[in-house]
Amino acid sequence: MQIFRKQESTIGLDIGSSMIKAVKMTVKGKINILESYALEPIAEGAVQSGEIRDPSSLAQSTLNAVSRCDAHLKDVVIALPNYAILSDVLTMNLTPEKEMREAVMIEAEQMSAFDLNDVEIDYSVLERDETAKKMKVLMVVAKNDIILSYIDFLGEAGLRPIKIDVDLFALTNIFHHNYDFEKYKSCVLLNIGTESTVAAFLRNGIYHSSRDISVAGTQFLRELESVTDLTAIQRHNVLQGDIRPDLDPDTLTESLNNANTSFSNAVSVALSYFQASDAVGKIDLIVLTGGYAWVPGLINVLELRTGAEVIILDPFNKVKFKEELMESSDPKKIGTILSVAMGLAARSV
């Protein structure tokens, strides 16, 4: 498993529980350019909590997505879901590079509940303190059977995974590509998916830790079931900010406020963990992304609940795209859906 090593890539592939997102990116000079993208639905139950249940169906959907980006390309960069791996930031004595893997293996043996023969381990040095003779190292542990399940279904699709990343690190990467993250002492990225929300905590621009949040898209959709005039598709559209003028505003507002409050309370608990773990004071910035980042009123409720500045991630803040790609789409809204896939592609272009 190569999580951090830079390799040439062509397609970034984000495999969710309900949809596959594929992007092709290139670089001209120092500018990243989105060349093409594709969104492909996944058969219900094909992927559940990061576990592949129907590899043949998933292989066909993935091949469809990649072919729509570029039918000639077979090399892809994929991400394991955050909940399929174990990660930790280690504080270690300064260690020569040639001794690093052995030192990290020793740490992993003490911390991991898995047999080291059954896992792949990778690491990245986050920072070195020459004065204190210490360094911070991000360690990632993934079970071999999970990795092989992803490699196998891609093989069935005729695709070659040239690199395996983690979705949360890919998201952090695209944030780094688009924002001056160093001006924020403490920052939280919230990837709001269908089944779960994952929070990535950054301190002084450096990855600190992550935490799963149980409230996500399904809870927002469930709250809107009280608005009886809405079909399932219309409920989804409302959560994207597309609200019909004939809807009862009082009923809709109440449902959205309930959903936003539940989500904000769950986020507040996660922030308390982050703040207590490393004596972090005020949270400077919360960045929303994922399929449910545009829920009406969510930014306001989060700002009131946390006291932090809240924005929606715009991966096109510095990354460019071909104008014809967005002729029928809002680049800001499609950008939140493509963020992880773009972070994968940006590691290698």
Image: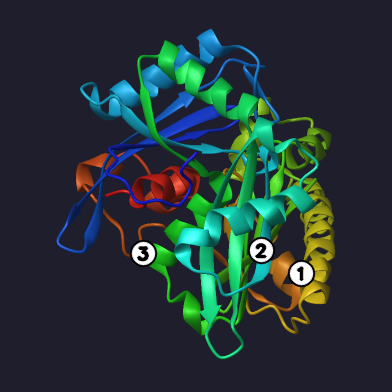
Distance Cα–Cα, label 2 vs label 1: 13 Å
Horizontal side of 28 relative to 135 (left or right) equals left
Above or below residue 46? Residue 291 is below
Q: Which residue is mark 2?
A: 89
Q: Position of residue 136 (x, y in %)?
A: 60, 71
- Determine which residue is flagged by label 1: 274
Which residue is at a point 73% across and 50% down the rendered structure image?
249
Q: CA distance from mark 3 to mark 1?
A: 27 Å
Q: Is residue 321 above or below residue 247?
A: below
Q: Residues within 10 Å of mark 1 (few under 14, many from 20)?
A: many
Callout 2 touching callout 1 (CB < 8 Å): no
Position of residue 327 measured from the top left corner of the image (x, y, whole percent): 27, 41
Q: Which mark is residue 151?
A: none
Q: Residue at x 44, y 44 (%)?
A: 338
Of the two numbered discs 2 and 3 in the rendering, the one whose residue sits closer to the viewer: 2
- Residue 261 in the figure: left or right of residue 65: right
Q: Position of residue 259 (x, y in %)?
A: 79, 50
Residue underneath mark 3: 317
Lower position in the chain sequence, tag 3 or tag 1: 1
Tell me the element at label 3.
Answer: loop
Tell me what residue is drawn at x 52 percent, y 65 percent: 125
Q: Is residue 54 above or below residue 42?
A: above
Q: CA distance from mark 2 to mark 3?
A: 29 Å
Q: Amino acid at mark 1?
A: Phe
- Give the mark count: 3
Badge 2 or badge 1: first in the primary sequence: 2
Badges 3 and 1: C-beta atoms under 8 Å apart?
no
Visible residue check, residue 313: no
Nearer to me, 113 or 331:
113
Residue drawn at x 55%, y 54% is 101
Q: Amino acid at mark 2?
A: Val
